[in-house]
Structure formats: structure tokens, C-alpha cells
Amino acid sequence: MSKFKKLLGSKNGHELLKNMAILVAGAGSAQIIGLASIPFITRIYGPADMGLLSAFLSLTLIVAPLLTLRYSVALPLPKTDRMAANILAATLLTSVAGILIITLALGIWSEPLLKFFNMEALAPFWWLLCMSIFATSLYETLSFWATRKKHFVAIARTKFTQTLSGSLTKILLGLLSIKPLGLLAGQIVQQGGGLLSLGSSAFPNLKKNRKYVKKKRALLALRHYSDIPTYRLPSQLLLMLSIQGPALFFSYKFGPAETGQ
């Protein structure tokens, strides 16, 4: 406790508390907007629509970590931006390769896969699922880079704009009777919102270190942090399965309407 009090009394401690407050404010305001939008969304869309959204979101959050192999969490760790830039390049490359494989797989097997979960209504929107997975993965990667550069205001701002833009999209498209597409499109806007903001803040530094990004260095960095996909990836998958698994189980057992309830 004495060490903790000493830390809080230092300059670094004040900066830490300030950064924590910024992130809490962004996340808290996003939660308030999300809660405020629920009464409108649940009156515009029916239980079956909400059930489809639940399965859509569950599949997104379970599959998204596979794209980066969780290497994104290593971005704040290296001492130099040169090494971090190599990790970022490798992470983006694995994400692109992963989403291409998933897109190909869903393009071929989306109907039997979604039928297994009693979500045949999602089959025409399998491409939106690919977009959602990729947007979630990309936002996670860029947010960890922003954490490295201490762009906490940008992260907090994106949390706010994500929820606001996603909720408004769901409500407006729902009022236009675009169902269930309105819910799915709103979810993509919510998960991908802030990508331009985080990308623009990261671009100058990435451009500066681009010449140091080499295949050999990237492989060395991935090897150095190989414990992340070995341990963090399985733990993240187990966490997401424990949180999102019940929704998929209800969908499989009872169908979208009951899941939506």
C-alpha cells in the first residue's frame, strides 16, 4: 500500500489516474447511450430480430480473436516503435489472411453452419458477418497501438461515437422497416466506428517507422512473443465461449425468437 500511495503521489501516478479517468469516462458514456437506446430498439425490432443479432454478435466475438492470434496485445510491450511496427504489420497481415479464409469458408458453408444454429435468416447476410469480424479485429489492433502511444482521449472518443452511431443506425433503419438488416448494419457501425480516427492518429508514426518493417524482424518479434498465441489466445476463446456460448445454445435449442426474448 505504501508503494501504491507513493506511485499515486508521483507524476507518473497522476498521469495514470488521468488516463484511467479518460477511459472510464468514454466507456461510461458509451454504456449510458447503449442503455438509453434499448427501449427504442426493443420496440422497433421483434424478438426474432434480436435473436439474430445475438447470434451474429456471438459468432463475431468468438471468431475475431483468431484473426490476430491475440498478437495485438503485445503492441504496447516493445521498448522501441520499430519493433512494435513489425508486430503491427504482422498482426494486420494475419488479420487479412484470416478474414480471407473465413470469407471463403462462409461463402461456401454459411447456409449449413447457420442452419445448425437455427439461424437460417442470417444466411443472406453472411458477408456482413465477415465485415463485423474484420472490423472488430482491426479496431482491437488499432486501439492497442493507440494505448502504446497514450492516445487515451482518442480511444475514449471512439467508444462514445461507436455506441452513438451504432444505436442511431439501428433505430433509423428500423424505423424505415429495414429488418433485420438494420440491427446487423448498426452492429457493424458500432464495432467498426472509430477506425478512421484511430487509423489517422497512428498513420504518421507508422509512416515514420515503415522502413524498419522487415520480414526477418517481424518473425523475430512474433517468436519473442510466442507465448501470447500459446496461452492468451486459448484463454480469450474460452472467455468468449463462456460469455457468448449461452446465446448460441439457446439459438440451437429453441430458435431465434426465444433467444431474442
Image (tube, rainbow, N blue to C red):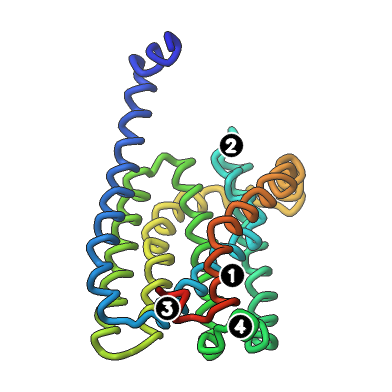
For the residues labelled 1 and 2, the Cα–Cα distance comes to: 37 Å
* Residue linked to disc 4: 114
How many numbered tags mark residues here?
A: 4
For the residues labelled 4 and 2, the Cα–Cα distance comes to: 39 Å
* Residue linked to disc 1: 249
Q: Compared with residue 222, is residue 124 higher up or lower down, i.e. above or below?
A: below
Chain-order first, disc 1 or disc 2: 2
Q: Nearer the viewer, mark 1 or mark 3?
A: 1
* Residue linked to disc 2: 77
Quick one: quadrant of the C terminus?
bottom left
Q: Amino acid at mark 1?
A: Phe
Name the residue at 33% across, 29% down.
17
Residue 257 or 13: which is nearer the viewer? 257
Chain-order first, disc 3 or disc 4: 4
Quick one: quadrant of the N terminus?
top left
For the residues labelled 4 and 1, the Cα–Cα distance comes to: 13 Å
